Image: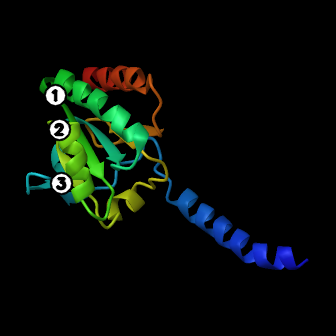
Amino acid sequence: MKHLQRTLPALVLLLGLFAATTALALEVGSTAPDFTLKSRSGENIKLSELRGEVVMVNFWASWCAPCRQEMPLLEELHDRYADLGFTLLGVNVEEDSNAALDLLKEIPVTFPILFDSRNDVSRLYNVVAMPTTVILDRDGAVRYVHKGYLPGYEDEYRKQIKELIRE
């Protein structure tokens, strides 16, 4: 009984958090929440200003092994489709951007890297897994959401990007 008394408050808290994150879940077909974040080049990038482009928003962290594995593959997607109306935004979710900048020295990329150090955008997009990738159509609607990364996901990304570019 004592075990239940100690466990019950934690369980109630977890259920409350689950309900809150479920309520905030990003729905396919909904308009992507707008945001503005500072990029590593120092400029502010506002998502709504990218309307007309197919946009991939990839939330990542330097401590995330799948993120590290995925980063060069994202660079390939960026290189391949950038001239066809595709923009890739890498959103780093760490409080201290120095770890991200160090990783980018090891794994250089040319697509915009944005910093969500207060996790405002991560919460807005209900990011609960690293990495999380959201693909938007040219009208800014959420079309695909991928939580996590396993080798081969990039094939699915490629297929989805090509489909949206053709629309």
Residue at 44 percent of width and 53 percent of height: 127
Q: Dot 1, how many residues are within 10 Å of its Cα: few (below 14), some (14-19), or many (20+)?
A: some
**Residue 111, which numbered label?**
2
Label 1 to label 3: alpha-carbon separation: 18 Å
Q: Name the residue under label 1.
A: 82
Circle 3: residue type: Lys
Circle 2: residue type: Phe
Residue 47 visible in the displayed image: no
Question: Where is residue 120 shown, x and y percent of the image?
Answer: 34, 65
- The image's colour scheme reads rainbow
Residue at 47 percent of width and 40 percent of height: 148
Q: In which quarter of the image is the C terminus?
A: top left
Query: In the image shown, does 94 or 88 lie closer to the viewer?
Result: 94
Q: In which quarter of the image is residue 53?
A: top left
Residue at 65 percent of width and 72 percent of height: 13
Q: Mark 3 points at which residue?
A: 46
Q: In which quarter of the image is the N terminus?
A: bottom right
Of pointers 3 and 2, the one earlier in the residue sequence = 3
Question: Where is residue 50 shown, x and y percent of the image?
Answer: 18, 44
| Foreground label between 1 and 3 | 1
Mark 3 in CB contact with mark 2 (< 8 angstroms) = no
Of pointers 1 and 3, the one earlier in the residue sequence = 3
Mark 2 in CB contact with mark 1 (< 8 angstroms) = yes
Q: Dot 2, how many residues are within 10 Å of its Cα: few (below 14), some (14-19), or many (20+)?
A: some
